Image (cartoon, grey):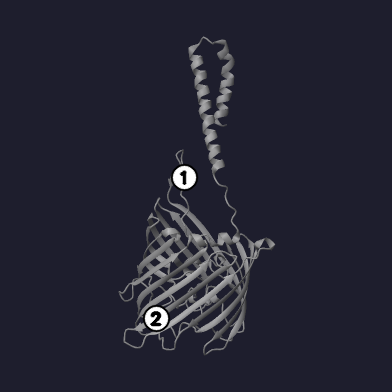
Amino acid sequence: MRPISLCLILLAIAAPWAGAQTSDAATKELIEKLLGRIDGLEKRVAELEHGKTAAAPAKAVSATEAMHQSHDQAPAPQTAGPEATPVYPSLKIAGFSDLDFSATDLHSTATGFGAQTLLAPHSGFEEGQFTLHLSSALSPKVTMFGEITLTARSDASTGSPAAAGFNAEVERIMIRYDANDYFKVSFGRYHTPINYWNTAFHHGQWLQTTISRPEMTQFGGSFIPVHFVGSLIEGAAPAGGLNLNYAVGMGNGRGQVISRGGDFSDINNNRALLANAFVKPDALYGLQLGGSIYHDSLNPLTAPAAREWIESAHIAWQKETPEFIAEFANVGHQPISGAPASNSQAWYVQTAYRLPWLQKLWKPYYRFEYIHVPKSDAIFRTVVPTFHASTFGLRYDITTFAAFKFEYRSYVRRDAPNFYGFFGQTSFTF
């Protein structure tokens, strides 16, 4: 029962008795206290109702808007008690998964391509990754984020002892202190902030428009270091409406298998260094322009030691009418032995458009991508393919949290037969 109702009942009971005892000073005092209590409660109720009215109604989030929202942010802490004291830690878990189908005219393994590109010499269904995002506020300024995946193995139950059915991987784990918007420092394992795709779209295929990532940013690929273990300092400033964002970092860099980050110390005691900056102008809301630079010293298992420099740039229009993403990266290798340096380039352009009809559930897209590795690049020439490819696709959002995707891809390779394929995927978040 609400306090104001209780007070009214008490007043109703007391009123007749009070009328018969008007000369009783104590009764008069009781009535005055009850009336004062009622007045106070009515004012409090009015204030609360005014606060609810003044608050803006929650905006309905479409499938596409939800897709571009960050899944890396820690949730607001829970509250308890009459004074709404925050409770820490405050954990939020989000999940993703997908099921894929591929059919190509390949007759052998597509050397150098990442497993999640779904290029196999046979057709069929494939279990995608099962992904969990875990975020938690540990205090008003300290948060943590983790990303864990389970990936089906093609060699399951073979060998002695028998291989497991899935590989478990800690893709990201980090703890961050937010001093303010301008300065945040974190430690952990990241998706290297070296280009746009690698920080905008993480594990969980539902997050991205397409079935697969561009090959230059493919998980398990070697062109750029997808993972980075170390520390980052980052922040953002209005900068006269440009909204300048920056990140600088130091970490272990690539491991001896260059497709993996240095999870267990640095292999040569030379830290990898990176710097990233981009702007998101107020005047062109949805536009992002930026670039990065990365330096490391490599000691690969099957190639000579070398110094590595990576320069990249991107432009992205983050809306869906249209969606547009373009990136370029140059990877330079200078062998320690003094052999000639080499430069490998990769770029892609992707465009899509959310159709205005049929409840805006359909989204056609196209991507062209290109990678060139000179034969003089001893580090990349056996692990990174030289090719160009076109992808035509259509995404259909079944609900706000699930989608069907259909793709046709055509590949032209150097020193290897061309091929094409048809691909399908159902992806979802929960």
Q: Nearer the viewer, residue 27 or 214?
A: 214
Residue extending furthest left? Answer: 269
Describe the element under mark 1 as helix, strand or loop.
strand
Q: Position of residue 393 (x, y in %)?
A: 62, 73
Q: What residue lies at 56% left-to-right and 81% top-to-bottom?
A: 389
The answer to whether any part of residue 112 appears in the image is no
Q: Position of residue 10 (x, y in %)?
A: 56, 22
Q: Which residue is mark 1?
A: 79
Q: Quadrant of the N terminus?
A: top right
151 over 159 or under it: above or below: above
The type of residue carrying mark 1 is Thr
State the separation of the CA atoms marked 1 and 2: 52 Å
Please tell me how crowded label 2 is: few (under 14), some (14-19), or many (20+) other residues with Cα within 10 Å.
Answer: some
| 50 to the left or right of 338 | right
Marks 1 and 2, the one that precedes in the sequence: 1
The quarter of the displayed image where residue 189 is located? bottom left
Q: Quadrant of the C terminus?
A: bottom right
Residue extending furthest right? Answer: 358
Q: Nearer the viewer, residue 137 or 39?
A: 39
Residue extending furthest bottom? Answer: 415
Describe the element under mark 2 as helix, strand or loop.
strand
Q: Position of residue 336 (x, y in %)?
A: 32, 84
Q: What residue lies at 46% left-to-right and 55% top-to-bottom?
A: 74
Q: Which residue is mark 2?
A: 332
Please tell me how crowded label 1 is: few (under 14), some (14-19), or many (20+) other residues with Cα within 10 Å.
Answer: few
Q: What residue lies at 50% left-to-right and 11% top-to-bottom?
A: 24
The type of residue carrying mark 2 is Gly
238 over 212 or under it: above or below: above
User: How many labels were placed on the picture?
Assistant: 2
